[in-house]
Image (cartoon, grey):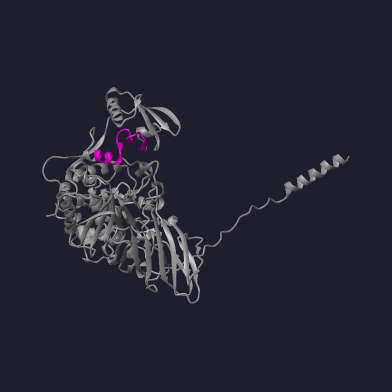
Amino acid sequence: MKYHLSLLAIATVLAGHVQAAPATNSAPQPTAIVDTIPSPIDKPYLGVINLNVDAIDTHRGIFRVTETLPVQTGPLTLLYPEWLPGHHSPSGPIEMLAGLVVIAHNQVIPWQRDPVDVYAFHLNIPEGVTQITAEYQYLSPTAQNQGRIQSTPEMANLQWNTLALYPAGYFTRQIQFQATVTYPTGWKTASALEIKGLTPDGQSPNIIQYQPTDLDTLIDSPVMAGRYTHTETLAPGVRLNLIADKPEDMAITDKQLAAHRNLITQAVKLYGAQHYSHYDFLLALSDKLGGIGLEHHQSSEDGEGPDYFTKWDKSAVGRDLLAHEYNHSWNGKFRRPADLWTPDYRTPMRDSLLWVYEGQTQFWGYVLAARSGLWQQKDALEALALVAATYDNRAGRRWRPVEDTTNDPIISQRRPKAWLSWQRSEDYYSEGQLIWLDVDSLLRQQTHGKHSLDDFAKAFFGMRDRDWGQLTYNFDDVVKTLNDIMPYDWASFFNHRLNERSTHAPLDWIARGGYQLVYKDEATDWIKGVESARHATDLSFSLGLTASDKGKISGVMWDSPAFNAGLTVGSELVAVDEHAFSADLLKTAIKNAKSTKTPIKLLVKQDDNYREVSIPYYEGLRYPHLEKIGKGDSSLEALLAPKA
């Protein structure tokens, strides 16, 4: 009886549970985000900030910083530069700042990192304190997987944005800095910064004090320093500063020096004005220091291999770097997109006009490399053939317009991508270059050679000689300047090429210029040079992959034969037709398959797995070439010819 009642009681409870209203799930509300960091105001800071850097420990890449700031009582926020000019992204290496201690009157002032903006440090300055000292280190990468190597036993690259904290609430052009650096004994330095004083005769310690300047100019004026240096004057006020792993790498011939001097001559003829008081190329010739190409208003950070001069007659690949970065003094530094200019390094940048900033600079980098003699005209034509074919075969254009790729510096910050041809990357560089080639060819065609993009360069970038401030622009300014040269529906012209999805790249300039894009079974010297520099074999336009000399796959074209066979970046080609992999063997297999119609057999290793792959590809090797149509003058050749 008791057992029966217990079951009844349980049933009653369960019935009541079923009939009860359902429980309400927890649903929190967001915690409010309060921005406690002062917005920048265009007014001078309290006084000069002293930035002292100990750069002696180059073997370990540790830069020790002591920064002294005038302050006043109350809240103070110190910022580490986040949004970096030239990077177009929030890529300030805050993770490498360490050991931060703030002191006043021998007492530690505690700091607290902002809970939202991790680049900001909040302090409360006590009564009576008019100066504080911040001590910290910048721990530069010691291995490539940490970032770009900035310090070796032979040389160092000091970038002030990695070393300086600055007070929030001010335009950075209104904050004055006095920088002093201690370098290893006997080292020499190069920078656009003017030197105020230095230790005589390079005695230990080798201390250099730079002239006081605003933070914008300081960050825009990095330093290359090294044990082995050499400087050549290219033009009045323009210097080529070489820093090398070994002194013999800096041996420059008269022919090579003439080409670099011609770069300055041709650029000044193009623009008709200069936007610097002096200019310094900071060219590191090293396979130890990380490579770089970064523009500044009165200098550029450039990195090439130690054989830049010694391989001169073997390959021209990479010799457009200085031309590209030098052009940025006009395009990007003086004329800057309005939405990309910011008053400090915390305000987010917007990259919508990078197809002008970087795309037209890519265009002029190639052109001035050819006009100066850094390249031969043949080099330029072969390089353009590769660019044209690459973007004409980029599958990602079917879903992603090139304008959207201007967001890539913020989206991906140059991290590797598994399916580059489908995802796209910073295509505003080279596809932007193709658009500007279209503009130039159209101007030349419609005006019968009277006008070209040279006229735009002079009108848009060449005003206000020796002005090295910043003059901003927007899309309408670009269109108006072109319409002043030749009336045309330029707005629709750009919108079509920038914002519409398409299956082919803008290549009308090729036919207008007197050429056609063709594919042949023999690689151009340019492609051979690229393969040599990258220690890779590029079969993008045939099998659809790129692989290292050892068979490691570094690229697979979307929808290509390699893609359809399931190959991926990171896999390894172990064997070709049952023989150990070599690049030559793979090329031979591709050639043979064209005649035998026999699938190409590969043994592929992916992680610890091996599998055999059979690829039914029978079209042979395909490499892009620009082939001249007919005889006579060519507007493309006219574009690449030096200005008289």
For residue 491, say whether it is visible. Answer: no
Residue at horizontal 36%, vertical 57%?
56
Q: Is residue 589 left or right of residue 8?
A: left
Residue at horizontal 30%, vertical 25%?
593
Q: Locate residue 629: give its quadrant.
A: top left
Residue 155 is situated, as x and y percent measured from the top left of the image, at 31, 53
The quadrant of the rendering that contains the N terminus is top right
* Up-down relation of residue 636 to residue 43 (above or below): above
Q: Is residue 281 left or right of residue 373?
A: right
Q: Locate residue 66: give its quadrant.
A: bottom left
Return the residue found at the far bottom.
128
Count up the numbered dots. Answer: 0
For residue 362, say whether it is visible. Answer: yes
* Up-down relation of residue 367 to residue 107 (above or below): above
* Up-down relation of residue 555 to residue 259 (above or below): above
Return the residue found at the far right.
1
Region in magenta: 527-556
* Up-down relation of residue 237 to residue 509 (above or below): below
Q: Is residue 158 left or right of residue 448?
A: right
Q: Is residue 32 magenta?
A: no
Residue 97 is situated, as x and y percent measured from the top left of the image, at 44, 58
Residue 340 is situated, as x and y percent measured from the top left of the image, at 35, 60
Q: Is residue 263 left or right of residue 394?
A: left
Q: Nearer the viewer, residue 111 or 542?
A: 111
The quadrant of the rendering that contains the C terminus is bottom left
Q: Nearer the viewer, residue 490 or 239?
A: 239
Q: Is residue 555 magenta?
A: yes
Residue 596 is situated, as x and y percent measured from the top left of the image, at 29, 22
